[in-house]
């Protein structure tokens, strides 16, 4: 029987989860997930490298917020994870003072409509990424997945979320560890 990692010895808040090549869940294959919260109740993260076929313009139309900024309107919405895919989540900096924000280091995770209204009015955060859904884990589940070679972890470099093209984020996060996905084995304990 595998020993579970004690929750008090590991906290992955503000870390990236890098899906290992053997990840069998199609929701997470080759994903990079930013962990926004990790505690005794489990973990919550946002996938930051999987844009979907929806632009901010169409999302804002759907929630009936006029968006006149063409650059903002053309930005993609991201698949944040399979949980509550019908809900929006905004990763942003600076953290700001929105109605429903979870501060995560120098990033905020906001779920309230006021941030979208501010973005449409040109007074939103300087850097932002809008996602539908989130990734969630029950207590001990993430630790178990890591021990089974499902994820690599590394302290998040938040510039990577906002300043690296989505298609390059996975490899850039691997680079933070000094490894390449091409050199990884699917078996635990082998590189």
Image (cartoon, rainbow, N blue to C red):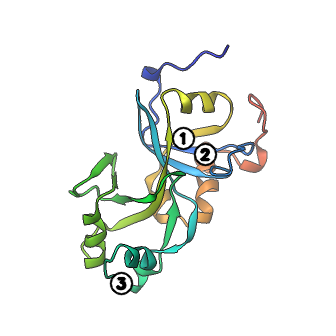
Residue that appears at 58% across and 61% down: 50
From the image, tell me which residue sits under label 2. 18
Q: Give the left or right position of residue 176, taking residue 110 as reference.
A: right
Tell whether label 2 touches label 1 (CB within 8 Å).
yes
Q: Give the left or right position of residue 81, taking residue 150 as reference.
A: left
User: What x and y, as percent, mark residue 178?
Assistant: 64, 44
Q: Earlier in the sequence, mark 1 or mark 2?
A: 2
Tell whether label 1 touches label 3 (CB within 8 Å).
no
From the image, tell me which residue sits under label 1. 154
Looking at the picture, does residue 128 appear above or below residue 150?
below
Distance Cα–Cα, label 2 vs label 3:
33 Å
Q: How dense is the environment of label 3, judged by Cα within 10 Å: few (below 14), some, or many (20 and up)?
A: few
Number of dots carrying numbers = 3
Distance Cα–Cα, label 3 vs label 1:
35 Å
Marking on residue 69: 3
**Marks 1 and 2: which is nearer the front?**
2
The secondary element bearing badge 3 is classed as loop
Tell whether label 3 touches label 2 (CB within 8 Å).
no
User: What x and y, as percent, mark residue 94?
Assistant: 29, 59
Residue that appears at 79% across and 39% down: 185
User: What x and y, as percent, mark residue 59?
Assistant: 43, 73
Nearer-the-camera pick, 186 or 175: 186
Q: Give the left or right position of residue 149, taking residue 48 as reference.
A: right
* Quarter of the figure that contains the C terminus: top right
Q: Earlier in the sequence, mark 2 or mark 3?
A: 2
Q: How dense is the environment of label 2, judged by Cα within 10 Å: few (below 14), some, or many (20 and up)?
A: many
* Quarter of the figure that contains the N terminus: top right
The secondary element bearing badge 1 is classed as strand
User: What x and y, as percent, mark residue 19?
Assistant: 64, 45
């Amino acid at each position: 029987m595998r020993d579970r990692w004690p929750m008090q010895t590991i906290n992955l808040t503000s870390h990236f989860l890098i899906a290992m090549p053997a990840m069998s869940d199609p929701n997470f294959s080759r994903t990079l997930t930013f962990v926004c919260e990790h505690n005794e109740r489990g973990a919550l993260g946002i996938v930051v490298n999987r844009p979907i076929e929806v632009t901010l313009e169409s999302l804002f139309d759907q929630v009936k917020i006029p968006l006149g900024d063409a650059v903002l309107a053309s930005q993609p919405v991201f698949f944040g994870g399979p949980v509550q895919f019908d809900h929006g989540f905004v990763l942003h900096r600076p953290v700001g003072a929105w109605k429903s924000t979870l501060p995560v280091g120098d990033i905020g995770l906001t779920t309230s409509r006021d941030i979208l209204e501010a973005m449409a009015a040109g007074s939103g955060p300087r850097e932002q990424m809008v996602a539908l859904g989130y990734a969630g884990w029950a207590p001990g589940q993430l630790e178990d997945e890591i021990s089974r070679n499902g994820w690599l972890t590394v302290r998040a470099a938040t510039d990577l979320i906002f300043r690296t093209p989505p298609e390059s984020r996975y490899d850039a996060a691997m680079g933070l560890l000094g490894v390449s996905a091409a050199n990884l084995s699917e078996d635990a304990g082998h590189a």
